[in-house]
Image (tube, rainbow, N blue to C red):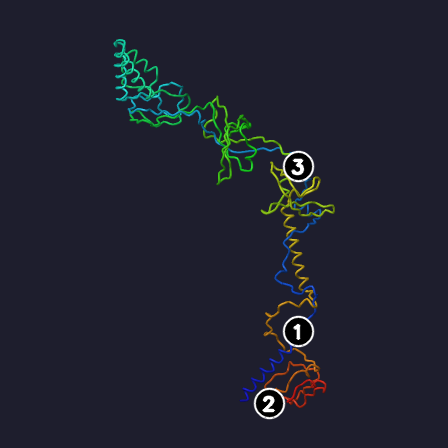
Amino acid sequence: MKNWKQITLSAVLVLAAAGFVGFQVQGDAPEVDGGMEGHNHAAMTAGSGQNPVRLSPDDSRRIGVTFATVEVRALERTVEALGTVTYDETSLANVNPRIEGWVEDLHVDFTGAPVRRGEPLMALYSPKLVTAQEELVLATGLLSRAAPGRARENAEALVESARRRLDYWEIPADEIRRIEETGEIRRTLTLRAPAGGVVVEKNVVQGDRIMPGMTVYRIADLSTVWVEADVFEKDLSLVSEGRSASVTFEAFPGREFDARVTYVHPTVSMESRTGRIRLELPNTDGLLKPGMYARIRLDAPALESTPVVPRSAVLSTGTRSLAFVRSGDGTLVPREVTLGRTVGRDVQVLAGLTPGERVVSSAAFLVDAESNLGALTAGMEMDGMAGDGMEGDGMEGMDHSGHDMSGMDHSQHQMDPDTMGAMDHSQHQMDPDTMGAMDHSQHQMEGMVMPADTGGAMDHAQHRMPPDTTGGAASR
């Protein structure tokens, strides 16, 4: 029973001491400035802006800071693009026989062979062609023997029908005339080149059977070639039909070829965000070959006079562009700018800078890092000052309900005897026999004298409290 009483009494005393200490701590809390009322600690973070930067001459030289002046001048605009040499599609010619047959003699037998207009390509044997020649010879003979009148009209109709059939099969007119005049029927028909140029495609060999509509040859005239080039979307407004351009090729270093824009395609590639243009170049000497890479340069009208700075003076963050302006006292002040077109190493400034101002033109990235570091440091110092300088009424509205004081050590707390009078000890029934188990070595109570020879059992009869400290105690 005594052990149970001892445990209960100890718990009561510990709870009473903790409550008293909490009351003292709350009562002695320092007053904070009234401006801190309702302050949210979560919002006390470093500022996200940028601070001006002040660098010593040695620091500027060490990181390589140089300056440029905001100038006003007209920018010469140039459009550059890469392209490929292709055939002039308007001069391509296909050889497509309109009659079934077999190739007996192939006069042009390799790709890339140069041909002239009317030059023999191959000899074709076709049974239908032989029959058509025989009909033309018979019709011509009937016409020569027909008497005037209806018989002659019928013979003329037969001749015209035979001629038309051969013409539909693209038999040359001089070949048809030869058949009529000589009456000689040839076993094969010679197909000739419809245009001059280079054979760029050959799909037949000797002995092949060909069908109507089959492409056996493709001939390209390379006296004029095209260059198909891709122009970035931002430069499409500077390109128009008829504009002159200069084209260079790696095969001919140091030589420029004059060209002219003949067509601007009406669509833009969704993948590359480029528009295609076509240039036309003369190629009378045959130096330019389809498939060559070309570098195109077009001179566009110059921009109006406008503030200009080097491209290296502007830092782009993705959402805005910054430039560091040198003030009169040497401070580098970050300033947001609005940019226009970029031409070579210069960029047009639409807003944010005034002509004549000096801006950082190199090492701007390092200056920007220093500015961001300064803003972060200033924010951290502000947080520290706010945490150390809280006084007074500003603590109102701050939520301390989450502060756990269960782990506080109250063994060193000194209790003023004047405050002891307000504590209600009437309910504390302490058995003198159990007091010996309590360790009061750390309790330093002013006004209480604890004899050193009390030993294990404390004699509370010797506790002398001033009369004015018991006035507030409730007794029953």
Q: Residues within 10 Å of mark 1 (few under 14, many from 20)?
A: few
Residue 306 image label: 3
User: Under tag 3, what secondary structure?
Assistant: strand
Query: Residue 228's x, y, as percent?
Result: 48, 31
Query: Residue 447's x, y, as percent?
Result: 71, 84
Q: Quadrant of the C terminus?
A: bottom right
Q: Which residue is mark 1?
A: 26
- The residue under the point 44% across, 26% down is 90
Q: Nearer the N terminus, badge 2 or badge 1? A: 1
Q: Taking 165 as reference, is 420 left or right? A: right
- The residue under the point 64% across, 48% down is 368
In this view, the mark in front (2 or 1):
1
Q: Taking 246 as reference, is 69 left or right? A: right
Query: Residue 255's x, y, as percent?
Result: 54, 26
User: Under tag 2, what secondary structure?
Assistant: loop
| Label 3, label 2: how far apart the Cα atoms are | 98 Å
Q: Which residue is mark 2?
A: 431
- Which residue type carries mark 1? Gln
Q: Are marks 3 and 2 in contact (CB under 8 Å)?
A: no
